Image (cartoon, helix red, strand yellow):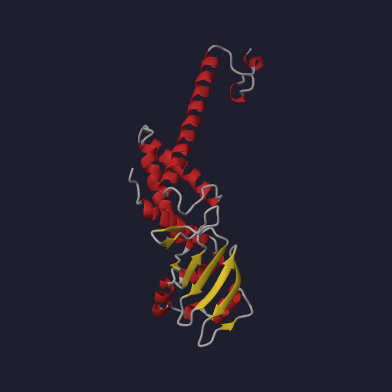
């Protein structure tokens, strides 16, 4: 069932979660200036998680550290999406009193700012992550999930392309709602997210098929009842005004 690359799928989910956590920083993200580092995910015992000697960052962690990759780098932090403090690193570090997006935009007009390759190299060495625009990350993730829905929907043997597309749409809609509502959670270090999404899509499609089955059974019973002159009294669509027919 290689509907998409599992590692890339996980990366796309990670990048969307990272971007969607700080919507106010989108202007810097869109200019390729924003590099971020969330907290490392920890075990229940409080032990940080590593994989192949690399930290497993948690894009859903409340606290994140950021830097604008300028010639004079700007380091700051956010908590639950809000800027809490930042520091401009120059020849001597100087604190900026107003910790807000407006103060950043006032001091660094985006029209004149470009990423500094020297600063980028330093940040990557410190394991900061180059963020991508939220909508770009979302559509990349959406494409892979749709591919998965399409492949799994075929397992339910749809009657033609129209029904196949309907199943894709139903599953995709349910999965996206779960993502938006945070009912589907990305957990670093757990089972591959491909497995999690595959299981979720199967459950969504089983739910769709069961609902269709119940509707068909209800329609069959209703049709049989009408043929036998026993239309249910609560079925308004099929009530007959017998007085009007006499």
Residue 37 percent coordinates (x, y):
49, 66
Residue at image location 41% in from the left, 62% down from the top? 54
Examine the rendered structure and indicate whether residue 66 appears above or below residue 211.
below
| 109, above or below 77, in the image | below
Please state the horizontal and vertical placement of residue 125, each as a whole percent of the image.
Answer: 41, 72
Q: Position of residue 219 (x, y in %)?
A: 51, 23
The quadrant of the rendering that contains the N terminus is top left
Q: Is residue 48 above or below residue 226?
A: below
Give the side of residue 93 with respect to residue 1, left or right. right
Residue at 50% of width from left, 20% of height from top? Answer: 220
The residue depicted at 39 percent of the width and 33 percent of the height is 156
Residue 106 picture quarter: bottom right
What residue is rendered at 55% in x and 50% in y? Answer: 182
Side of 137 relative to 178 (left or right): left
For residue 128, which quarter of the picture? Answer: bottom left
Where is 132 relative to 231, above or below? below
Q: Is residue 142 left or right of residue 181?
A: left
Residue 209, image x, y percentages: 46, 32
Q: Quadrant of residue 50?
A: bottom left
């Amino acid at each position: 069932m290689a509907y998409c690359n599992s590692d890339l799928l996980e990366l796309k989910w990670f990048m969307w979660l990272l971007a969607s956590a700080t919507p106010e920083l989108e202007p810097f993200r869109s200019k390729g200036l924003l590099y971020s580092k969330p907290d490392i995910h920890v075990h229940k015992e409080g032990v940080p998680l590593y994989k192949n000697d690399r930290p497993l960052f948690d894009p859903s962690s409340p606290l994140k550290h950021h830097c604008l990759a300028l010639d004079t780098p700007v380091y700051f932090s956010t908590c639950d999406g809000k800027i809490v403090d930042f520091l401009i690193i120059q020849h001597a570090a100087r604190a900026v009193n107003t910790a807000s997006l407006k103060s950043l935009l006032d001091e660094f007009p985006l029209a004149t700012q470009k990423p500094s390759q020297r600063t980028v190299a330093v940040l990557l060495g410190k394991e900061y992550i180059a963020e991508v625009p939220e909508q770009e990350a979302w559509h990349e993730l959406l494409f892979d999930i749709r591919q998965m829905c399409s492949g799994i929907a075929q397992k339910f043997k749809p009657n033609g392309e129209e029904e196949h597309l309907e199943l894709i749409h139903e599953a995709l809609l349910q999965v996206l709602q779960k993502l938006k509502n945070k009912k589907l959670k990305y957990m670093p270090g757990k089972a591959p997210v491909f497995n999690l999404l595959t299981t979720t899509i199967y459950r969504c499609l089983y739910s769709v098929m069961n609902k269709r089955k119940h509707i068909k059974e209800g329609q069959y019973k209703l049709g049989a009842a009408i043929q036998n002159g026993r239309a249910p009294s609560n079925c308004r669509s099929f009530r007959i005004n017998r007085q009007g027919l006499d």
